[in-house]
Image (cartoon, rainbow, N blue to C red):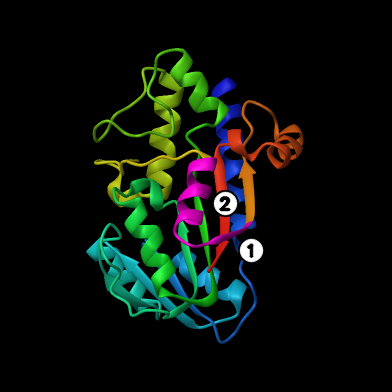
Amino acid sequence: MIKRYFSYLYQNTAKNSTKCLLSLLEFNPKAKLLDCGCWDGKNTLKYGNSIGTKKLYGIEVYKPKVKEARKKGIIVKLGNLDKKLPFPDEAFDVVVAYHVIEHLVSVRVFASEIYRILKKNGYAVIGTPNLASWHNIFALLIGLQPFSGPTIYPNYESNIAMVRDLNKQRTKEVFPDYYENSLQHIKVMTTRALVSLFKNNGFKIENLKGFGYYPFSPLISRPLSNLDPYHCHYIVLKARK
């Protein structure tokens, strides 16, 4: 029963954070959108629909998924987000990076590159786990690696069976092709660290939302997340150039 409850909390958190991200995208049929870590392009199409644009671009490191995204009509480049992005200055109106930045090493390079390729008054929407969430703090208190990472080696699993099973289920659902090798979380930031990163790279923070105030149910979690986004599971940030 406890496992089902926390699985429910996670699914609700993921659903609401995605809904929030889509709501932060401004309607603009002329906008050029870049989806960083676009995978197979399914989410890129959703972002495009919310904005009302067909000018969809992506960058993805995993070659088989690049091909799938291209079949959907998205202009995708094979590339590494830890390095200079293969696009000219001020090329995009919107940049989205949803559950991407935590997989990178050079987060400062990534933030500065987003700033470079955005047009004046363009904006970025970033979604990522929060290192200072209550469930990560609890893990540290009992001597475990934070549940959100950093991941210390591929296929690292928690000593707690319930957490191990939930992590396997989540990874299999989101990244089925990577299930055996598991994507690593390398730079997991606190909410304040994420805000500071983007401010230090010239951005103005327009919106900051938190989701998943564990172990509380969604009904209680929602107002607590609004009051205290610094201890939620997920963070969604909107930053303007």
Q: Residue furthest top?
A: 142
Q: Secondary structure at mark 2?
A: strand
Q: Is residue 23 left or right of residue 32?
A: right
Q: Which of marks 2 and 1 precedes in the sequence? A: 1
Point out which mark residue 24 bears.
Answer: 1
Q: Amino acid at mark 1?
A: Leu
Residue 16 visible to the viewer: no
Q: Residue at x 30, y 60 (%)?
A: 81
Q: Residue at x 48, y 62 (%)?
A: 202
Q: Secondary structure at mark 1?
A: loop
Q: Is residue 59 left or right of residue 220?
A: left
Label 1 to label 2, Cα distance in Å?
Answer: 9 Å
Q: Amino acid at mark 2?
A: Val
Residue 138 visible to the viewer: yes
The dominant secondary structure in magenta is: helix
Magenta stretch: includes residue 199: yes
Q: Residue at x 25, y 61 (%)?
A: 83
**Split into 4 quadrants, where in the image is the N terminus?**
top right
Residue extent of the magenta highlight: 192-206
Point out which mark residue 236 bears.
Answer: 2
How far across and down, in percent of the image, does residue 173 sit?
Answer: 43, 46
Q: Residues within 10 Å of mark 2 (few under 14, many from 20)?
A: many
Magenta stretch: includes residue 97: no
**89 vs 133: above or below:** below
How far across and down, in percent of the image, does residue 13 sit?
Answer: 60, 42
The answer to whether the residues at label 1 and label 2 have Cβ atoms under 8 Å apart is yes
How far across and down, in percent of the image, does residue 142 sit?
Answer: 45, 12
Along the line of sight, the residue nearer the viewer: 218 or 28: 28
